[in-house]
Image (cartoon, rainbow, N blue to C red):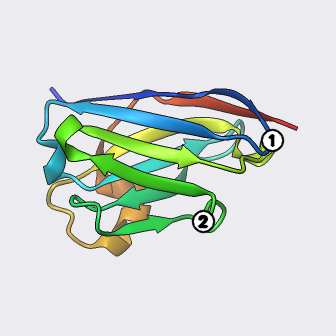
Amino acid sequence: QVQLVESGGGLVQAGGSLRLSCAVSGRTFSSSAMGWFRQAPGKEREFVATIARSGGYTNYADSVKGRFTISRENAKNTLYLQMNSLKPEDTAVYYCAAVRPTSNIPGRWRSQTEYDYWGQGTQVTVSS
């Protein structure tokens, strides 16, 4: 059974930083590209960032580019999202997800349909 468990969310002031973690079990972590998505109240879930199996390719939503960094540590089966210069509009529930092993086109990893397992989410609240 594949499980993804996020941690690291919380309340932070605007301009602050947080690092989210996602622990993966039940699948060979290094066999999956991974991604982060978020869902703000009253809005649809949206793409934040994605990273290839080896970490050699990353892609970001324009809204977080230059402020957020996605990374992974395959030896620890863990995905990270370093969030700096946080803004109130970053407030959302953040989800990590695993790309289907058969999905090999990085350009498609911005779409939720390319992901087959999801975590339960962790709340990030940025106060102004």
Q: Nearer the viewer, residue 126 or 76?
A: 76
In-image side of 82 versus 124 (left or right): left
Say which amino acid is labelled 2: Lys
**Total labels drawn:** 2
Q: Residue at x 57, y 28 (%)?
A: 9
Which residue carries the number 1 mark? 14
| Label located before the other in sequence (2 or 1) | 1
In the image, residue 57 sits, relative to residue 15, either above or below, namely below
Q: Secondary structure at mark 1?
A: loop
Residue positioned most to the right: 128
Q: Secondary structure at mark 2?
A: loop
* Quadrant in which residue 91 is drawn: top right
Which residue carries the number 2 mark? 65
In-image side of 69 versus 128 (left or right): left
Q: Quadrant of the C terminus?
A: top right
In-image side of 26 versus 58 (left or right): left
In-image side of 111 versus 33 (left or right): right
In the image, residue 8 sits, relative to residue 117, either above or below, namely above
Q: Residue at x 32, y 48 (%)?
A: 72
Q: Position of residue 119 (x, y in %)?
A: 38, 32
Measured in 3D between alpha carbons, the distance from the residue under mark 2 to the one under mark 1, in whole angstroms, is: 17 Å
Say which amino acid is labelled 1: Ala
Q: Nearer the viewer, residue 4 or 30?
A: 30
Circle on res. 113: none
Q: Position of residue 69 (x, y in %)?
A: 50, 55
Question: Mark 1: few, some, or many residues within 10 Å (few <14, many ≥20)?
Answer: some
